[in-house]
Amino acid sequence: MKCTGCEKSIQDELMKLDGVDEVHADFRAGTVSVAYDLMYITLKDIVETLSTMGYSVHKSMVDRLKNSFIHFSEENEKSNMTASPLPCCSHPDKRL
């Protein structure tokens, strides 16, 4: 990002994506913060959108590890949100 116009472009484009609730871009800091709903979009989708816009996303080893962890966490959370609850009779603790 080089200017406030870049910030606006990124914010406008990401806000068009289903599941994106909030976007804050800061060209001085070189950061983009996104609040999104895992049921509709993932970090990978957001990064791909930024890449198609011509913005590079850092690919250092730390960034790749961080993104892998986020991807794992997102998939785990999505699985938890869509899982059927266990029937109460399957709980071994009779006090519940």
Image: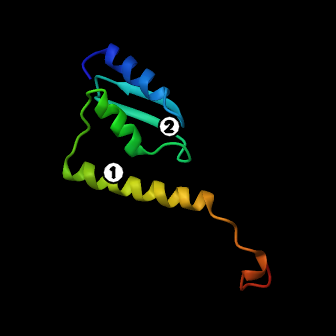
Give the amino acid type for the residue marked by disc 1 in the picture. Answer: Asn
From the image, tell me which residue sits under label 2: 35
Work out whether 68 lies above or below 47: below
Work out whether 23 lies above or below 72: above
Q: Position of residue 72 (x, y in %)?
A: 41, 59
Q: Position of residue 45 (x, y in %)?
A: 40, 41
Q: Position of residue 22 (x, y in %)?
A: 51, 30
Disc on res. 75 = none
Does residue 39 appear left or right of residue 2 in this picture? right
Does residue 62 appear left or right of residue 4 in this picture? left
Q: Which quadrant of the structure image shows residue 7?
A: top left
Count neighbours of disc 1 (C-alpha within 10 A) and say few if under 14, some if 14 to 19, many if 20 or more.
Answer: some
Residue at image position (45%, 57%) is 73
The Cα–Cα distance between marks 1 and 2, rounded to whole angstroms, is: 16 Å
Give the amino acid type for the residue marked by disc 2 in the picture. Answer: Ala
Q: Name the quadrant of the C terminus.
A: bottom right
Does residue 68 appear left or right of residue 84 in this picture? left
Residue at image position (24%, 19%) is 2
Does residue 40 appear left or right of residue 31 in this picture? right
From the image, tell me which residue sits under label 1: 67
| Colour treatment of the image | rainbow
Count neighbours of disc 2 (C-alpha within 10 A) and say few if under 14, some if 14 to 19, many if 20 or more.
Answer: few
